[in-house]
Image (cartoon, coloured by chain):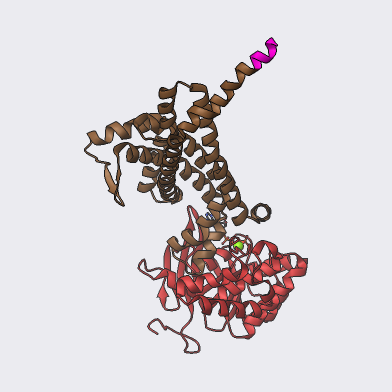
Amino acid sequence: MILLAEANAAAPAVSDYFGSAIVEYLPYFLRGMLMTINISFWAAIVSFAIGLVVAVLRVTPSGGLKVVATAFTEFFRNTPLYVQVLVFYFGLPKLGIQLKFSFFGIEVGDSFSAGTLALGLYTGAYVAEAIRSGLLAIPRGQGEAARSLGLSVLQTLRLVVLPQAIRLVLPPLGNLYSAMLKNSALLSSIGVMDLMFQADFVNNRTFKTFEVFTSVVFFYLMLTLPMGWFVHWLEKKYNPLRAKTLRLQGARI
Amino acid sequence: MSISVDQPNGRTPLIEFREVHKHFGKLHILRGVNEKIMEGEVIVILGPSGCGKSTMLRCINHLEKIDGGDLIVDGINLGDPHANVNRIRGETGMVFQQFNLFPHLSVLQNVMLAPMKVRGISKDAAREKGLKLLKRVGIEEKADAFPIQLSGGQQQRVAIARSLAMDPKIMLFDEPTSALDPEMIREVLDVMRGLAQAGMTMAIVTHEMAFAREVANRVLFIDGGKVCESGTPAEFFDNPKEERAKDFLSKILKH
Ligand SMILES: Nc1ncnc2c1ncn2[C@@H]1O[C@H](COP(=O)(O)OP(=O)(O)OP(=O)(O)O)[C@@H](O)[C@H]1O
Ligand SMILES: [Mg+2]
């Protein structure tokens, strides 16, 4: 009898877990997820663009720009992301750089653009290193063959060397973008209303700390896992012959 | 026509080396090379390892920059810093020991790439041309395969087709069969022989002496950074004049 009574007492707690706090605040979490996707999307674009340029500059023989590119990677890789986010958010306005603007009629706030830029540049430094290692792994003869056919330096990069280098480093790039998505949670600290921000908000309202943050884990997984699958799919799509190619090239060199 | 000097037969050479020098750091590799290659000639370049055979070919399509003298390719002086180098590269097809096919592109795409991107011809025209060239090197059934799915000999034939797609005025071959298994050497040499018979101007670095003797109009023997001896295959192989050439031949013909 006593055992049964205890079991009954536990039951409402479980239904309460799923029932009230999370379900009631689900729209907040969903809005947060959308924002997390939004920041990650823009940061991914920034980081890929900057990563490509920096990687290419770092492998060119010429001096000046190479130094700048190296300084960029070293700076962003050797300081904490959190500090960079704060510097961009508080520092840039002090330098007179205004990051508030309107994009397709949507007001983009300081925190969003500063945060996305910081996250994009930070990730970009790692992306640059990944792509650089890919570039260095492409046999010299590839560029020479392209050049000897009359392709310009830029065409050689764009059509021959970079496509191979990027295919080669898809797995590490996948890891970097998964890390970037998780790192985006830091932007909640400057007021970006992402998943983490909404979780804090719901927690402050409901005090159901454990429930809130375990669900947040789940929501993040719903973002990172599909992204991992997507990268895996890309690898399969573009690289069915990759392992074989490398083995043979290695054997011949 | 502006650079005709003393042509034996009145024609302008397609390629002319005038006192060409090339250093790699302290290494002085080409030490005043003088040579003319006329249209339609098939030249085989021989010489001991490290004498600069590859360097000579690579200078012609400007993969290496010469640092002394003049190198005139199809009327353009590569010694001139303002020379239009990309144009020259399109005119001089290069076939490498390692094939260097683009592994991310199919066989046909390998052949179509440069005509489309450099010459600006349409995709359909490039495809048609590509298929025709693949047929010429006997490999059209592999058009949609990827390089990795081909044997070495097949890859090298695709590489030749890829160069031909630019309608080059001269084809440069740097040891095209040295990375191949013996049974595949023949198929590549057959394609090259066909090119020679069709009148293609060719400069070939090779260790295939029987092939050299058969196909070459002229053999150049390089040593000490210069063209040490030049003559017909019969003259060179049967009756070399230079001591160093005799020495070289005795070594390679022993086995
Ligand atoms: N990029 C380079 N940097 C430094 N040295 C080089 C470079 N390329 C070639 N060399 C050197 O120049 C010399 C001539 O090289 P090259 O490749 O032209 O010789 P080769 O006659 O083709 O020899 P092989 O028969 O071995 O292919 C060699 O001693 C080589 O080590
Ligand atoms: Mg060589």
In the depicted view, which residue is nearer to us: A236 or A10? A10
Chain depicted in brown: A
In the depicted view, which residue is nearer to us: B128 or A141? B128
Taken as a whole, is the magenta stretch helix, strand or loop? Answer: helix
- Up the image or down, A251 lies above or below A152; here it is above
| Quadrant (top left/top right/bottom left/bottom right) for the N terminus of chain A | top right
Residue B41 percent location from the top left of the image: 57, 82
> Was residue A2 drawn as part of the magenta stretch in this picture?
yes
One can see residue B71 in this view? no
Q: Which residues are magenta?
A: A1-7
Residue B72 percent location from the top left of the image: 44, 74
Residue A159 percent location from the top left of the image: 50, 62
Residue A202 percent location from the top left of the image: 43, 27
Write the residue at 55% across / 29% down. A18
Which residue is situated farthest in the front direction here? A1
- Up the image or down, A174 lies above or below B182; here it is above
| Quadrant (top left/top right/bottom left/bottom right) for the C terminus of chain A | bottom right
Which residue is situated farthest in the left direction here? A96
Query: Can you tell which quarter of the image residue B212 is in?
Result: bottom right
Which residue is situated farthest in the top direction here? A2
Q: Is residue A35 left or right of residue A232?
A: left
In the depicted view, which residue is nearer to us: B2 or B255? B2
In the depicted view, which residue is nearer to us: B37 or B84? B84
> Was residue A221 drawn as part of the magenta stretch in this picture?
no
Which residue is situated farthest in the bottom direction here? B10
Query: Can you tell which quarter of the image residue B161 is in?
Result: bottom right
What color was chain B assigned in the picture?
red
Q: Is residue B150 left or right of residue B62?
A: right
Q: How many numbered circles are shown?
A: 0
Write the residue at 49% across / 47% down. A132
Find ligand 1 in the image and state its quadrant: bottom right
- Up the image or down, B121 lies above or below B50; here it is below
